[in-house]
Each structure stands twice: as structure tokens, then as C-alpha cells.
Amino acid sequence: MFSRKYFFIGGFFGLVLLLVYIFSLPDGKLHVIFCDVGQGDAIYIREASGMDMLIDGGPNDKVLSCLGENMPFYDRTIDVVVLSHPQKDHLQGLISVLERYNVRYFVIGVEGNKTEGYKKLAEQIRTKRIPYKNLFQGDYFMLGNVRMNVLWPERRWVAEKLQQPAFAEAMAGKAVLGMATDANINDFSYYLHLQYGEFDALFTGDGDSRIQPEVMTTAGLPDVELLKFPHHGSKTGILPEFLDEIKPEAAVISSGKNPWGHPTKEALQLLSQRGINILRTDREGDIEVESDGMSWEVN
């Protein structure tokens, strides 16, 4: 005979699942989560309609916990994944992400290296037949109502650094992976400008003061509300004139235990002298910024 006890238990758990589902539905706001992955970068972005993207994956599997906490339990697909540049503290966690989630689109630079982590990531992209694209300054893509503008790298700059005939394929629009270079790999970092209504954010990977004069010369820099501070708060992370050009109200520094003293006192002073709100994953854990396209706040 069917037990009334089990009926009520089943009904209770069904109600719990229904409530979880309802509260995980899109809320009409943009959410930008800077995941605490230690000394590395991982940024999860969920657009108002529910479309999402991940910029970098950090140096380990901690990004999976961040995704688990911020993605609906029923969602196993990430619309766009971006690798800012191929270094372990940005790419390693993406290997685990690709193993556990479906990825619809991958944005990746033409530059590569010979590390096992990069080789495995590139092989996963090919094996899983994930569509991938190399983007350059002037390109953009849409994530629902969010526009992502590529401010760096610039095509001619990349061509000069690679000095390889194969780059002609990328110049012609054909995506390529893993091209060798003797240049500093940080310099290839994607600079992505997020636009959502009146809210603007800039994501910078590890692209620091070495390339910022080029960015300032070749790209139209926007005023932004939010800055992902380059290179984990390194001493040479940002030029004062670059910072004065973009005028951020808040800057997020993604860092963890490290031997380089990140974030450095020089970086912190540069921000504090300008009254810029400093947010640090090494002290605050995951940092969430929410916007309705007009106002914004840190949760």
C-alpha cells in the first residue's frame, strides 16, 4: 500500500526543488562574479536573460565551486568561454570546466605555448569540436544585451610579434591555435570592454604597463565603473595615465598567496590616491557586482 509518509516526503522535496528552480531563474540583472581561485583569474558573467560567459579559469579546480554556487543547478552549458592568455593561473581551471560543462563558443588568442596544460586545453577544444575564434581590437560580440568590445590585442601588433606566415590565416578570419612566440605572453592578454546600458567594465588579464601605451594609442578607451586590475595587482600593473583615462570607481584585484607580494603597495597606493574602491579576492573571497544597466552595486 502506498504510504502517506512517503507521499508527504516526496511532496516536500518536490516543493524544495521547485523553489530552488524559481529563485535561480534570471532576475533581469547583470551579475559579474570574480571567483576566488587564489593567485589567478576567473570571472563568471551572467547576463540578465540568463546567457553566461567565463573569462579564464584560474590555476586549479576552485572555479568549479564558484560556478556551482552561481549557476542554476540545472544549467550545464556556458555560452562563451574566453581565455585571456595562455598561462597556468588563467587556463588550468578551464580544463576541468570543459570536462564538466558544455561550451558553445570559445574565444582564444592565436598565441600558445608548449606547456602540458595548454596542450590539453587545445586538444579538448578540438576533440569536443567547440567552435573557437581569434578576436582582435575592433571586434565585438554580444551576450544577450551585453556588448563585449575587444580593445586589445591589435592585429598588426600580433603579426609583428609572431612573424609567421601562418598568421595570415588568422588575419583572413580563420581561427588558429598555439602559434609560438618569443614575446612576453602577458602582452597578448585580451582587454575586454563590457557595455550594459550605462554600466561599463574593463577586463584586462595580465596585460600591464608594457602594452598600455599601445592600447591608449590604438583603441578608444571608455570611462568605466569597474576595472579588473591587471596582473593581480603587480607593481607594473597599470600606468597612472591609463588609470586616469578610464576613471574607474572600483577596481577588483584577483590574487592569492604568492611570492611576488601581489597586490603590491604601489598598486594599492595608485588606487587609493584616486579614491577608487579596492576589492580583493584574497580578503573578501568571491566578489559579485550586480547591475540593472543604470545603477550598480557590490553584493
Image: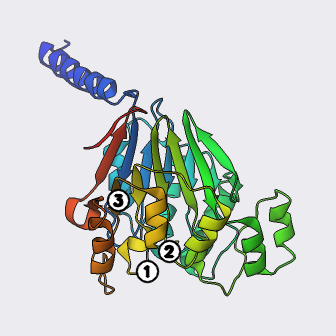
Q: Label 1 amino acid?
A: Thr
**Residue at coordinates 49% horizontally, 34% vertically from top-left?**
197
Structural distance between the alpha carbons of marks 2 and 1: 6 Å
- Image quadrant in which you'd find residue 40: bottom left
Check contact, mark 2 vs mark 1: CB within 8 A: yes
Tell me the tag on residue 208.
Answer: 2
Residue 277 visible in image = yes
In the rendered structure, the answer to whether residue 252 lies left or right of residue 134 reads left
Report which residue position mark 1 lands on.
236
Q: Is residue 275 left or right of residue 125?
A: left
Secondary structure under the numbered disc 2 in the rendered image: loop
Image quadrant for the C terminus? top left
Residue at point 55%, 76% (across, down): 186
**Residue 94 percent across, percent down from the top left:** 50, 62
Residue type of the residue flagged with mark 3: Ala
Looking at the rendered structure, the number of numbered marks drawn on it comes to 3
Quarter assignment of residue 282: bottom left
> Under tag 3, what secondary structure?
strand
Please name the amino acid that badge 2 sits on: Asp
- Residue 57 at what x, y percent from top left? 45, 62
Tell me if mark 2 has few (under 14), some (14-19) or many (20+) residues whose alpha carbon lies within 10 angstroms of its own: many
- Residue reaching furthest to the left: 5
Alpha carbon distance from label 1 to label 3: 15 Å
Quadrant in the picture for the N terminus: top left
Other-residue count near label 1 (Cα within 10 Å), few / some / many at <14 / 14–19 / ≥20: some
**Residue 34 in the image: x percent, y percent?**
36, 55
Q: Quadrant of residue 270?
A: bottom left
Residue under label 3:
251
